[in-house]
Amino acid sequence: MYEYELQQLRAADLIRRADHERQVREAARARRAARREAAEGSAEHESHIRRFRRPRSARAA
């Protein structure tokens, strides 16, 4: 009986850990999505992007 109870405790602990890790992943995913949406919506962000990169120095012949 003792081993069965230990197995039940281990199983419950594993389920709790899996739920916690799932919540952490979902929170991180939500934060990334919010940052992406905020970056897409800001006009200020796009004004600082250099669309075409030009070399800073002249080419050597």
Image (spheres, rainbow, N blue to C red):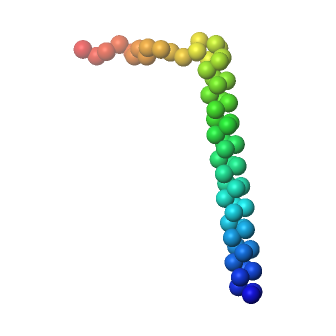
Residue 40, image x, y percentages: 61, 20
Horizontally, is 57 left or right of 50 in the view? left
Residue 52, image x, y percentages: 44, 14
State which quarter of the image contains the N terminus.
bottom right
Q: Nearer the viewer, residue 25 or 54?
A: 25
Q: Please tell me which residue is depicted at 66% across the width and 30% down the height of the picture.
A: 35
Residue 27, image x, y percentages: 70, 43
Q: Please tell me which residue is depicted at 70% across the width and 85% down the height of the picture.
A: 3
Residue extending furthest toward the left: 61
- Note whether 56 is above or below 17 in the view shown: above
Kindly indicate the quadrant of the structure image that contains residue 8.
Answer: bottom right
Q: Please tell me which residue is depicted at 74% across the width and 74% down the height of the picture.
A: 9
- Note whether 6 is above or below 54 in the view shown: below
- Note whether 24 is above or below 48 in the view shown: below
Horizontally, is 59 left or right of 15 in the view? left
State which quarter of the image contains the C terminus.
top left
Q: Is residue 22 visible?
A: yes
- Number of callouts in the render? 0
